[in-house]
Amino acid sequence: MSAAPHAGQAAQPATFAFDAANLDRARAIIARYPAGRQASAVLPLLDIAQRQAGNWLPRAAMDYVAGMLDMAPIRVYEVATFYSMFNLQPVGAWFFQICTTTPCWLRGSDKVVEACQRKLGIGIGETTADGKFTLKEVECLGACVNAPIIQVNDDFYEDLDGPSTEKLIDELAAGRVPPRGSAIGRQKSAPEGGPQVLKAMPPRYEWTLEPPPAPPAGSDD
């Protein structure tokens, strides 16, 4: 695969508006906040806008959210540019966020990055010409026990190495979505090979709450 033109060349849509379902969702979120505090809804509304726009935030979407929340557009831009969860340029249908922080690096994230670059023919920050895959290097994703890890869109793929990363790419390219989680069958965040302690669930105890004793006769309590 080859790389697409730099994302900065992407055309910005002239307008943006929530569809009916997302407008209902946005209004329900805004209603959680007191009058005059609707700006507190900016993060979830930007997330809804990004999902509707195809996993990126055009400027028109940010302006739309600003108007809906009665915020100056620059305040919304500040939020969108601060949080790495928001993509200010288009990304591929399969957005690979590869953790290379220390725990993942110690367990072989370099091999994962190399496999992605070799298999897809692109570098970090690039998108394949067919628009299917984008690579991004990120800081800790919070799944260090199961390192190395790639976040693909909303899902975590864990315990990866070079071959399992290439297999993941092959499956996604073929339109098949592998089960998320550990590539080696690890049970949640248990040690490799399975749990070493608490291998059986302890017996359940039924607790009964007794009502408090009645106060002595004549008591004011």
Image (tube, rainbow, N blue to C red):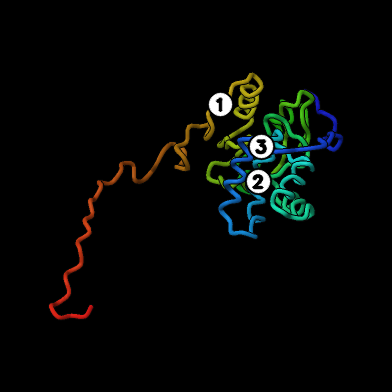
| Local crowd size for mark 1, using a 10 Å CA cut-off: few (<14), some (14–19), many (≥20) | few
User: Label 1 sits on what residue type?
Assistant: Pro
Where is the C terminus found, in terms of image quarters?
bottom left
> Which residue in the structure is indicated by mark 1?
178
Residue 118 lies in what quarter of the image?
Answer: top right
Q: Report the Cα–Cα distance between label 3 and label 1.
A: 21 Å
> Which residue in the structure is indicated by mark 2?
45
Q: Secondary structure at mark 2?
A: helix
Mark in the foreground, 3 or 2: 2
Q: Position of residue 144 (x, y in %)?
A: 56, 46
221 and 2: which is toward the camera: 221
The answer to whether the residue labelled 2 contacts the one labelled 1, judged by CB atoms less than 8 Å apart, is: no
12 and 27: which is toward the camera: 27
Q: Position of residue 151 (x, y in %)?
A: 62, 38
Task: In the rendered view, tell whether residue 30 sits above or below residue 134.
Answer: below
The residue sitting at 58% across, 51% down in the picture is 31
